[in-house]
Image (spheres, helix red, strand yellow):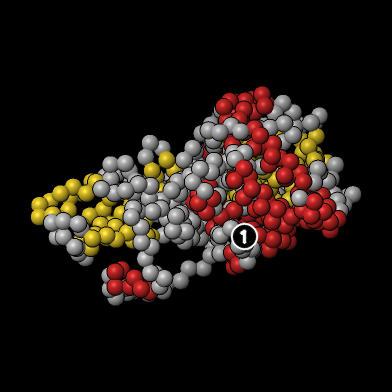
Amino acid sequence: MGARLLYLLLLGLLYEQPRGDRSFTIDDDQNCFKKDGVCFHYISGSIHYFRIPAIYWKDRLMKMYMTGLNAIQIYVPWNFHEPEPGMFNFEGDGALEHFLDLANETGLLVIVRPGPYICSEWDMGGLPAWLLNKKDIVLRSSDPDYLSAVNSWLSVLLPRLRPRLYNNGGNIISVQVENEYGSYHACDYSYMRHLFHTFRLYLGDDVVLFTTDGNTDRELKCGSLQGMHATVDFGPADDAKKAFDLLRRYQPTGPLVNSEYYTGWLDYWGGNHSTASPQMVSHGLQTILEMGANVNMYMFEGGTNFGYWNGADYKEQYKPITTSYDYDAPLTEAGDPTEKLFALRSVISQFLPVPEGPMPPPTPKYDYGVVKLQKVGDITDFLDILCPGGPIVTRYPITFEDAKQYFGFMLYRTRVPWEIPDMTSLSDPFNGVRDRAYITIDGSFTGVLERDHVRMINVTGSAGDWLDILVENMGRINFGSFVNDLKVKCITH
């Protein structure tokens, strides 16, 4: 403990000291942010570097700058940067500091939301799935096992941010602690206080720390905490005055902030693409700005859930989120300006000077011709290649997390124990398939079991046939009380 404390003290000496001519603070008397001693309002847009290939970062940032934004807002996904305990990745599309530097070069301030939980419609809300290897862990709480992992992560992340704080010569003007905690069932103030003190330890006493919650009493009560500036979320269909009046019960003074003004919405597999009209979104923005409030538009560009990083919601039933995170945002998934962007730019120009010059053009598109796919075999033909270490032999099915394969697909194999001459039900009565299972017997496809949708199929087979259950993880729940979303939870009968 003494060695760690000495390390932190020495680390603090290495940090760039605050520059006297740069400050970003809250003025509770004038109800505004003060940047270098002058009242300041930000108009920001959310962009997620981890959903956009790094080669396009500069293009997207320049389009946001040319829209008239003076700030951007980002999440930092813990699981993206620490895929295995103690293994960190801040390179390539995870080069957070490079992204911050590009934003600085472009003339954009940054609002950082480092979690540790972020939601973001991202797998498990940004929490690493390897946390679930401790079966009784209580996420987003003061559970010692959870806090130990959080402390380790923040001890790596926050020192990377501190030199880039505005007061230290960088462009980070404020940092959010946790995320929409009032929407979580725990309401653990000890946990929030622990995070508050940890952020202060690594970032210092000068940086503006804030919380964000939905516009209900319960959410603001459980999500806000003394010492951090409370902000609220709402979209263009909500009553802005009513939302800010509610916020004033929990944040009586200081600047009004909508940290997530929704420009569109997310999409679920099997559903229609969500849209929000340019007229409605731009009118709502104008209302907020006329009230003298600060605003961040969520999203300004959504981007793409590459790989297996999409999350899922649970609203009466499991709803996985699509690979596309277009969000009907002002910049499309491909980074192209839309009618919505120009409508918002027109509104912004009434409140801030918009840079002169043309908007950068849409991303070039290419015709790659016809791509032909040819079947080379069945998955069972390649098991030695896909699993060179051989199978895990267990008496009962184990979870993805037990096997330390956190994403993608797992094949569960067993022999049919007896003759099944007539159609017999293969059922999942406890909804343990997480989230979609493709069933074959003796190599013949039999049907699909799907979480909350298909719980029983009929099968037939002979004793000794291979019963194969290929289970697909379609994304862990990212919001609400069920973020501890184990993949495959019980035995399939």
The image shows residue 342, relative to residue 391, as above or below, that is above
Q: In the displayed structure, does residue 319 sit left or right of residue 91?
A: left
Question: Is residue 8 shown to the viewer in this render?
Answer: no
Q: Residue 287, image x and y in percent?
A: 61, 34
Relative placement, left or right, of 115 versus 460 is right
The amino acid type found where label 1 is placed reads Gly
- Going by the picture, which residue comes out furthest to the front? 395
Q: Is 40 situated above or below 57?
A: above
Q: Residue at x 57, y 27 (%)?
A: 218
Q: Is residue 51 visible?
A: yes
Q: Where in the figure is residue 347, as x and y percent of width and height? A: 62, 43
Residue 446 image point, x, y percent = 20, 57
Question: Image quarter for residue 455?
Answer: top left
Q: Which residue is mark 1?
A: 86
Is 311 or 124 nearer to us in this picture? 124
Element marked by disc 1: loop
Could you classify mark 1 by the number of other residues whose Cα lies within 10 Å: few (under 14), some (14-19), or many (20 or more)?
few
Q: Residue at x 65, y 53 (%)?
A: 153
Please name whichever residue, 56 or 49, is drawn nearer the observer in this view of the structure: 49
Residue 23 x, y percent position in the rendering:
83, 46
